[in-house]
Amino acid sequence: DNDVRKTINIAVIPGDGIGKEVTPQTQAVMGKAVGNQVRLNYVDYDLGAERYLRDGTLLNDEDLESIGQQDAILLGAVGDPRVRSGILERGLLLKLRFSFDQAVNLRPTKLYPGVNSPLKNPGRIDFAVVREGTEGLYSGMGGYIRRGTDQAIATETSLNTAFGVERAVRYAFDLARKRGGKRNVTMVNKTNVLPHAGALWLDIMDKVAQEYPDVTWDYLHADACTIFLVTDPSRFDVIVTDNLFGDVLTDEAGAVVGGIGYSASANINVTDEHPSMFEPIHGSAPDIAGKGIANPTASILSGAMLLEHFGYDQAAERIQRAVEEDVAANASRSRSTQEVAQDIIARL
Ligand code: ATP
């Protein structure tokens, strides 16, 4: 009965460039994967560089309020070489992230058989990075103590609250339990040079770990972590870290598993009070935009994360399995965006 079926209201922001090409394919794959289980109600928003260049709008109150009423956000990519770096990031992406209190940035990192890793002996890579998404050095606190090109002094303050750190850490322990793999959380920081924030993070790890006797945890300095990500990536299960280290480490992790076409991410509001946002990590790729050759896999995997977030684990797993089979069979062939999506849908 259609009327009693659950509905997920999804704000769709295809954005710019290849975002516009991959997002509709992801919607088609998601629809096929859920079948009659749930109704996916898509609400489109025209946001991104093109909108900004057209009428100067980044994200107005009306759109923000309307998006806030949806259950989730599916984002394609925003960016355009004609828009100065930082404008869209701060005026649109960070504004969404902060307005909807998306405290956890989640990046699953998996090497699919068939995909070329730059590592000679990659082994079995399957871990997730949980990055605290609202604090740290991204708090915007700081300023100029003194101006003047030669004498300028600028500060940037890293904000770490027990509240903010605990929700990221708790999310990481829950995830390690849910993944059911090594059941290990690795905290990454630089406690040797960041004594205050480092101690706070360690205290919270200690405290939260007591509640998860079935999950082990260890600690790595960020510099050591960058090394292990290329020398022994199969050691990791769940990594939890702050905003800046997370930004850097997730890009490195993405590269290790064959890069940009396969990396999905979620910005999660842990209380479900506001919508979480699901997006591929790649940008709008102006160099290939309009050619219909962008790989939609990262966006499709982001769609799977969205379904998993709402408890449709089986539909999400079906997509992941279809992607895995598709990659194993076809990763070396060049296909159009639509062909890849059709091949994945055929396997579903
Ligand atoms: P941004 O600043 O928005 O991250 P960028 O130009 O630094 O933009 P991308 O837009 O991700 O980064 O593009 C980086 C390179 O990867 C480009 O050469 C682009 O063509 C390629 N690329 C990105 N996404 C895809 C994709 N889905 N399929 C194929 N190639 C891609």
Image (cartoon, rainbow, N blue to C red):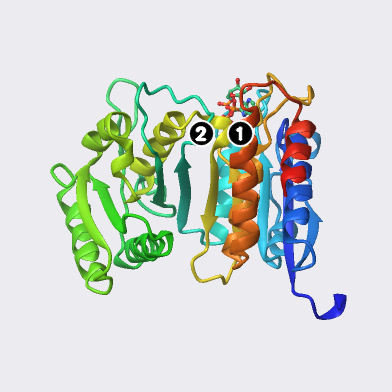
Amino acid under label 1? Val
- Asked whether 190 or 315 is in front, the reply is 315
Say what secondary structure mark 1 lies in: helix
Q: Which residue is drawn at 53% across and 54% down?
A: 267
Packing grade of label 1 (10 A; few <14, some 14-19, many >=20) is many
Q: Which amino acid does label 2 sit on?
A: Pro
Identity of the residue drawn at 68% across and 58% down = 64
Task: Give the side of residue 127 with respect to residue 161, left or right.
Answer: right
Looking at the image, is mark 1 or mark 2 earlier in the sequence? 2
Q: In this view, does 14 lie above or below 294?
A: below
Based on the displayed image, in which of its 4 quarters is residue 84 positioned?
top right
Of residues 43 and 46, the one nearer the viewer is: 43
Q: Quadrant of the N terminus?
A: bottom right
Residue topped by disc 1 = 327
Circles 1 and 2: CB distance less than 8 Å? Answer: yes
For the residues labelled 1 and 2, the Cα–Cα distance comes to 7 Å
The image position of residue 156, as x and y in percent, is 32, 42
Q: Name the residue under label 2.
A: 113
